[in-house]
Image: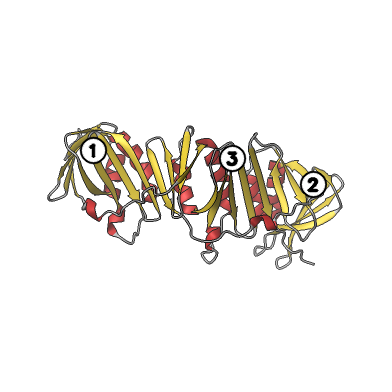
Amino acid sequence: MKFSISSSELLKQLQKLSGAISSNPVLPILEDFLFSIEGNQLSITSTNLETSIETVTEVSSDEDGKLAIPAKILLETLKALPDQPISFTVDQETRGIEITSAYGKYKLAGDAAEDYPEIPTEDNVSAVEIDSGILANALSKTIFATSNDELRLAMTGVLVQVDFDKLVFVATDAHKLVKYEFSGIQSSEASSFIIPKKSLMLLKNTLPSDGQVKIKFNKSNAFFEFGATRLVCRLIDAKYPDYNAVIPTDNPNELQISRLDFQNSLKRIAIYSNKTTNQVVLNLDNGSLTISAQDLDFSNEATEQQACDYTGDAMSIGFNAKFLIEMLGVLETDNVRLKLSSPSRAGILVPDEIAEGEDLLMLVMPVMMNN
């Protein structure tokens, strides 16, 4: 088997796929890329058994064939080569690989393609289509709110709800929750599934800046197709908690404030907070916000006042500064609104403006106040 390709083009494709290569895999073959040639089409696959990525690119080839090639040495070789045509010659019997460049020859040993795991196929799938930019936005707004607690398996992923004409993405770790909605899809059914955080990180890093993404799913897997790339991930088999039950519906007290001013103030005040709770206290009264924190163990204390619009009852409420800072960093609008009902109920953080067809809600649980 022999084929030729541009070194930079091959490197570009492999870098997309390298995220699914584990450094300490359960099977040695998972350290490899699977190369498969049919006609002049080279299909390359990587997998860690939970997430698989496949991409197809054009090559100049003289025969069909398959081979698993060690990822690390191949990537390092391509990174060290300037852009030029390179050719691969594979001995199918010995699985020896010879790469020829303008500088010389490089020989390495491949592995049997038959040992490479089977990538899940699309059986009994449902499908929706979404704009790549909107999907990337949904992921960046939700991934950070997932849990790392393996005992709460459902929360370690993002819940995706397909609801005829809209998609809902939800993530929570029980302290914070994000719900992002996009209406503008077409689906013949309503369904939901949970995608692992790691798979979504890989998807986010491989998504193109524009174009359409086709999402197909069944009970076990989700399939994402865009351009010449296909990402397959195993779904989390668990029941997602009833997130709507924790979202307070009646929030008569509302703070409107500059997002960056609020975030920067919290960053400064948090330095003086208790390092276990990261608690900051918001004192809200007519048109004024005072942010304070103290760490009694070290006699540290800080207070700042911020210009804002506040309507509602005077209130003092404690929050974990780290969570608020993180949420404000994910939002993009100049101003944000914090809606509150009482000091013991969750606060709702929303952007001041949002694109048509989209909806975004962030919830943060209060920290019980130190007396």
Tag of residue 38 = 1
User: Does residue 104 lie above or below 195 as drawn?
Assistant: above
User: Does residue 23 lie above or below 66 as drawn?
Assistant: below
In the foreground, 40 or 303:
40
In the foreground, 365 or 320:
365
Q: Earlier in the sequence, mark 3 or mark 2?
A: 3
Which residue is depicted at the point 40% across and 55% down? 50
Of tags 1 and 2, the one toward the viewer is 1
Please tell me in which quadrant of the rendered image residue 62 appears.
Answer: top left
- Residues packed near mark 2 inside 10 Å, few (<14), some (14 to 19) or many (20 plus): many
Which residue is depicted at the point 58% across and 36% down? 184
Asked if one can make out residue 326 in the rendered structure from this viewpoint, the answer is no
Mark 3–mark 2 Cα distance, whole angstroms, equals: 31 Å
In the foreground, 110 or 118:
118
Mark 1–mark 2 Cα distance, whole angstroms, equals: 61 Å
Mark 3–mark 1 Cα distance, whole angstroms, equals: 39 Å
Q: Earlier in the sequence, mark 3 or mark 1?
A: 1
Task: Evaluate if marks 3 and 1 touch, with contact meaning CB atoms under 8 Å apart.
Answer: no
Please tell me in which quadrant of the rendered image residue 185 appears.
Answer: top right
Q: Residue furthest front?
A: 188
Instruction: Locate the N terminus by quadrant.
Output: top left
> Which amino acid type is shown beneath numbered disc 2?
Glu
Q: Which residue is mark 3?
A: 165
Q: Which residue is mark 2?
A: 254
Q: Is residue 238 left or right of residue 309?
A: left
Q: Is residue 211 left or right of residue 183?
A: left
Of tags 3 and 1, the one toward the viewer is 3
Asked if one can make out residue 58 in the rendered structure from this viewpoint, the answer is yes
Which residue is depicted at the point 56% across and 59% down? 155
- Residues packed near mark 3 inside 10 Å, few (<14), some (14 to 19) or many (20 plus): some
